[in-house]
Image (cartoon, helix red, strand yellow):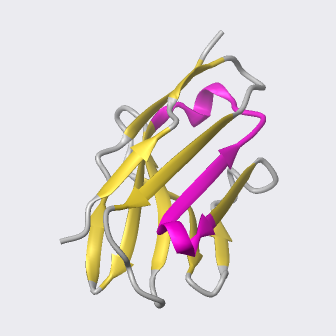
Amino acid sequence: QVQLVESGGGLVQPGGSLRLSCAASESIGSTNVMGWYRQAPGKQRELVAHITSTGGINYADSVKGRFTISRDNAKNTVYLQMNSLQPEDTAVYYCYVIYGGLTWGQGTQVTVSS
């Protein structure tokens, strides 16, 4: 079964930027969806953004204009560029892939604080 390895989380001040990466351990074929959810303490997991293998993109309203999702199909990797980060963006960010079934990454902590 494919595994997802995330990297790029950390602590950043308000207004700062981070870039998350999520790499699949094996080829995930030519038809799939990759994306990111996040879960803040005491809140439900929510969709941040997703991108299809043909480049279709969807963002949560709360991150539009600040976050950019992209992917490198040759590397089976999805990225999330996060700019103008705010304290309310603090959460554990989980990547996922829908390919055959649904697979989650282990999560990476993003903390926005001064």
| 50 part of magenta stretch | no
Residue 62, how many percent across, how many down? 68, 51
- Examine the image and state in which quarter residue 92 appears: top left
Asked if 98 appears above or below 37 in the picture, the reply is below
Give the residue drawn at x 75%, y 39%.
83
Outermost residue, front direction? 74
| Depth check, front residue: 45 or 71 | 71
Give the residue drawn at x 31%, y 62%.
25
Residue 82, how many percent across, how many down? 68, 42
- Examine the image and state in which quarter residue 88 appears: top right
Of the 4 image quadrants, the one containing the C terminus is: top right
Outermost residue, top direction? 114
| Depth check, front residue: 66 or 98 | 98
Asked if 75 appears above or below 16 in the picture, the reply is below
Asked if 70 appears above or below 91 in the picture, the reply is below
Q: Which residues are magenta?
A: 71-91
Residue 8, how many percent across, how many down? 52, 36
Residue 44, how many percent across, how many down? 37, 49
| 77 part of magenta stretch | yes
In the visual, does 67 lie left or right of 27?
Answer: right
Give the residue drawn at x 39%, y 71%.
97
In the visual, does 40 lie left or right of 90?
Answer: left
Give the residue drawn at x 45%, y 84%.
32
Asked if 96 appears above or below 80 in the picture, the reply is below
Of the 4 image quadrants, the one containing the N terminus is: bottom left
